[in-house]
Image: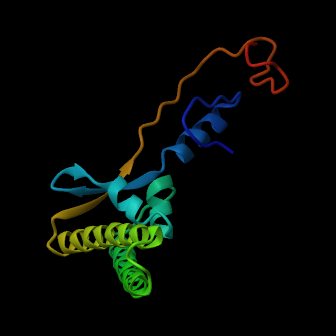
Amino acid sequence: MAHGWGLYFAKNLRIGNSYSRRLSKESTKIYLDGKNITADIQSLLEDTDVGSKLFYGESRVREQEIINGLSSFAKEIALEIEKEKRELKGLNPWTPEYSSLKETIKDDEMLHKEANEYLRKFFSKKITVKDEVKERYLLKVDIPNDNVLLREDAPFDK
């Protein structure tokens, strides 16, 4: 298993090629007027399958999946805002709970507005979704004679 950033070593060229192919999968990027907004969309959808796919770049994400994810998020947050507003009515305006809930509502309304703005931009075709291949390099290096690539029991300074 290989993941993250860094260098991966293999004694066998076939395994090295396999690592290179698997780690350079296509990933989906989202652009608004040429600017990459993938991270913005991902942060809105972070608790969804679509957000995870965007974050980890594990597989391509289709435009309709992103639109559905944004639409579901906008609906869920709208329901949450209504619930919070009903709860707010039952609180004393002079309590810390009231102030805190008021801030939460304000934050949620901003997220709702942002999701709806992105949806409008998708429908007006200002947003484009592209599949891109991550850069990959396969280098040949000389392996030391002792043939040990990783000594898990060695201290970090060795």
Residue at image coords 21%, 63%: 127
Residue at image coords 29%, 67%: 110
Furthest residue to the front?
94
The quarter of the image holding the N terminus is: top right
Residue at image coords 34%, 78%: 74
Can you see residue 146?
A: yes
Which is more toward the observer, 73 or 81? 81
Which is more toward the observer, 40 or 94? 94
Residue 77 in percent (x, y) is at: 39, 78
Q: Quadrant of residue 15?
A: top right
The quarter of the image holding the C terminus is: top right
Q: Is residue 14 left or right of residue 102?
A: right
Check the image and report above or below for 35 versus 83. above
Residue 59 in percent (x, y) is at: 48, 60
Can you see residue 57?
A: no
Which is more toward the observer, 71 or 107? 107
Furthest residue to the right?
153
Q: Quadrant of residue 129?
A: bottom left
Color theme of the render: rainbow
Check the image and report above or below for 113 versus 19. below
Residue at image coords 81%, 27%: 152
Which is more toward the observer, 62 or 15? 62
Q: Is residue 75 left or right of residue 58?
A: left
Residue 49 in percent (x, y) is at: 51, 69
